[in-house]
Amino acid sequence: MMDTPDLEIQLKTLPNAPGVYQYYDKNEVLIYVGKAKNLKKRVSSYFTKHHEYGKTRVLVKKIVTIKHIVVETETDALLLENNLIKKYQPRYNVMLKDDKSYPWICIKKERFPRVFPTRRVFKDGSDYFGPYTSMKTVRTLLDLIKGLYALRTCNYNLSADKIEAGKYKVCLEYHLGNCKGACEDLETEAAYHTNIKAIKEIIKGNFKDSLSQFKQQMKQCAEEMRFEEAQKIKEKIEVLENYQAKSTIVNPKISNVDVFSIVSDEGYGYVNFLQLSYGSIIRSHTLEIKKKLEESDAVLLELAITEIRQRFNSNSREIYVPFQLSLGEGIKVTVPKLGDKKQILELSVRNAKYYRMERFKQIKIVDPDRHANRIMAQMKADLRLSEAPRHIECFDNSNIQGTNPVAACVVFKNGKPSKKDYRHFNIKTVEGPDDFASMEEVVYRRYKRLLDEDEPLPQLIIIDGGKGQLSSSLKSLDALNLRGKIAIIGIAKRLEELFYPNDPIPLYLDKKSETLKVIQQLRNEAHRFGIEHHRNRRSKNALQTELETIPGVGEKTIVDLLKTFKSVKRIAHAKLDELEAVVGVSRAEKVYNFYHEK
């Protein structure tokens, strides 16, 4: 596969060490960045094995120069790979979306610290907590803190000498009870910092110390007969307990843990991140990753974990993931099997799925072509097809008590009904209720006509029925020499079993899968269209049967009467002169006498 001796030399000189490799094309443009435990083995594998996916084969053909960076550990390689991808955005690397600035909570480094939201982080000695994924989360937390503790909101320089000099006066916030008047030395620095310490613990998710402190204060106020103050503290306790109940997930003992899960389809991966502290979720975020080389879930998840932990400045030493990953030394990777840990992981998976569903809804509105492409790619994979089924046709037979046998063919293009291409068939060669023979006739007639008229054939045929109807359809395809040129499957109604030619074992799709939903929609539409045609035929035949029993009245007379009077009932009640005006004197008398003698 290697075209130039330069590549061979480069491969031979690669070290057996962890690091990051970079691929450049003939224009010296960086097209791919990857990490490896062993650079020589990993890079050589690109050129020595056959790649299943076409994009990877294209990438390999474009590689002209290989550069590498050796690092100490695999963790360093992960971080370096992530930074290089974000900086250079190589064409064949996954795309990490959403680089907006996230909000933080700042506790300012001041004598009486202010607590406020910000989107900018400075190295000024202040404490920054975050980033959070939405300003709504920040405001909810700040509202909680404001309700529990009286903090200043002014930006005065409350130095000791300025306060002693009486430079400031208390404002409205003091009179409303939202501030204790530190500007006039009405609150000590030590008491203020005790509250700041408690606030830091609440932001981290630890409510235990604050609850204990408030309960002690409430008890003391009650003992000293200060019942109004005790009631206010009780209300604060209720607020804090209510917030804790909403934020606690399973087990308060689970602390300082990051949880990651992934849901993916043909083109994208969706990685959900939950950060836990003292059993509470303090952060949730979902990252969408565009695939470039059919990357596996493990590859996407490793990359996303590095990116998210950097973005949100997470230093958790333990990570919960759905399958085993290698994230380097110093990080404990846990794959939960049961209990509270498993429930937390399942919650993360649900979040990823909900995010994916919301994205699908948005894409369906904004970019219908991408939505159709995704559905087609999913159907191709689920149904084990050689090409995406952009043109699908579904057949269904309709006969009730063996009368008026008909069949319907509905057509879907790009996953949507193409009603102008629907066709219905009256069964011509089969006597009685024989579904197998009827299906054979209809499939033959349909594709014989498409071949004769040089019309495009579908990529997939769906037969509403089990093995019998599928076998009958195959006979028609054999007769037309189309066997193997068009994919064909049968769907049994009872258990939604999918049957393939020459395969006795049916395929069962996930009941919630989009592929099964499209197939069910096709089957239901074919049934509806067939029943509608069957009903029309029975109605027409029922009308004509009575008129045909009148002696001396032929088909042309019946058609003329129905065109004028619209129904048999109106013909029966018509006056003789009205009938004569349509079909003449002789025939009018026969029709009139038939109904009036009855």
Image (tube, rainbow, N blue to C red):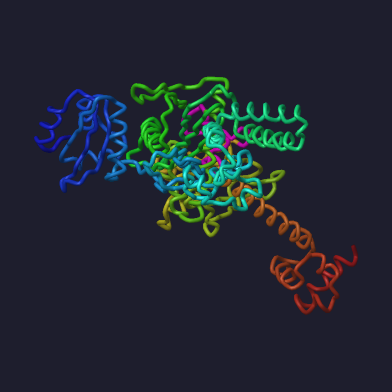
Q: Position of residue 400 (x, y in %)?
A: 70, 45
Q: Position of residue 177 (x, y in %)?
A: 65, 46
Residue 508 on the magenta span: yes
Q: Tell which of 338 and 222 is nearer to you.
A: 222
Q: Tell which of 567 and 375 is nearer to you.
A: 375
Residue at image coords 66%, 54%: 532
The quarter of the rendered structure image containing the C terminus is: bottom right
Q: Tell which of 541 and 590 is nearer to you.
A: 541
In the image, taking residue 558 as reference, residue 155 lies left or right, namely: left
The quarter of the rendered structure image containing the N terminus is: top left
Farthest residue toward the front? 165
Q: Please count the marks in the image.
A: 0
Q: Position of residue 360 (x, y in %)?
A: 50, 47
Magenta range is: 493-518
Farthest residue toward the right? 597
Q: Position of residue 591 (x, y in %)?
A: 82, 69
282, above or below 325, in the image:
below
Q: Tell which of 43 and 332 is nearer to you.
A: 332
Residue 231 in view (yes/no): yes
Residue at image coords 71%, 34%: 234
527, above or below 319, in the image:
below
Residue 347 in view (yes/no): no
Residue at image coords 48%, 36%: 272
Residue at image coords 17%, 36%: 66
Residue 67 on the magenta span: no
